[in-house]
Image (cartoon, rainbow, N blue to C red):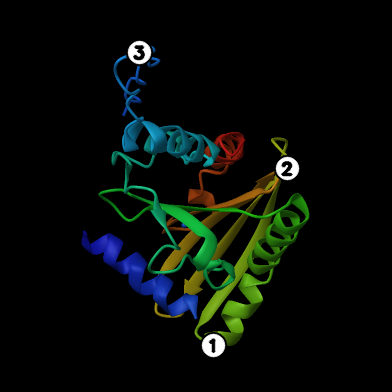
Amino acid sequence: MHSAAAALAVASALIAATAAPAASAAPAQSVPSQPVPAPSVAAQSEPAGQTAAKARPAFLEPGDLPPYLSSPWTAEPVTAGVPDPLPFCVGEALPASIARHRVFRTDLDAGATQTTVVERDPARARALAALWTRAVRDCPGRTEQQNPDITAEGRDYGRVAVGDGAQVYGVHVAHSAGSSNIHLFAVGRDGRTVTVVTWGALGGFEDAPVTGFRRTARTAVGKLA
């Protein structure tokens, strides 16, 4: 990672305490003198695998994130569990045992994550979304209590009308030593599926791509269905 990315990682650490299916076998034809062959193991297991894949919500692609200066976004594969290191503000509220996530990077100091959870029912999903929302709203005060050398401020960037709703927030943190980071969060739900997208870079509120990130939030929740 470049030195700017390393600076962001250090600052975030201080304030922290996101193939086509095989052709199915042709129907067996009855041959009086020969036994009908049993279906292959692959043919038996393939439909279930296809169903499971379709049931999983899709994740953001690099092009769905707001452009960042001259550096393109790249993405790691979707992975079970939660990002490591945990995202700022919401990391401690992510249920690692049932979450899936994707990490996004640039060649500069910006980074992003998406973490998605499919709950057992919409009520549980609604409660999880509320937990993540509280984690973001309480983040500035919690961060200042845990780090006396840090000043933090939060902003509510409003609701995004998609699925069962998404909310976008921003949190700026400034260290007495001079470093300054800006973070954006989107918490959204569709049915029993909840997602949280985090974005962070060096800078202040004036550097936050709020309009572009609201589009990212809309895309993220739209892919949950």
Quarter occupied by the N terminus: bottom left
Q: Is residue 33 left or right of residue 159?
A: left
- Amino acid type shown at disc 3: Pro
Give the side of residue 131 with respect to residue 20, left or right. Answer: right
**What residue sits 45% from the left and 68% below the top?**
86
Residue 134 in picture, x, y percent from top left: 70, 66
Q: Secondary structure at mark 2?
A: loop
For label 1, the residue is 148
The residue under the point 35% across, 23% down is 36
Q: Tell me the number on the disc at residue 165.
A: 2
Q: Position of residue 208 (x, y in %)?
A: 51, 49
Q: Which mark is residue 32?
A: 3
Q: Is residue 178 visible to the viewer in this orientation of the structure?
A: no
Q: Between residues 37 and 140, which one lies in front from this camera angle? A: 37
Tag nearer the camera, 2 or 3: 3
Label 2, label 1: how far apart the Cα atoms are = 35 Å
Q: Earlier in the sequence, mark 2 or mark 3?
A: 3
Callout 1 amino acid = Pro
Task: Point out the frontmost of discs 3 and 1.
Answer: 3
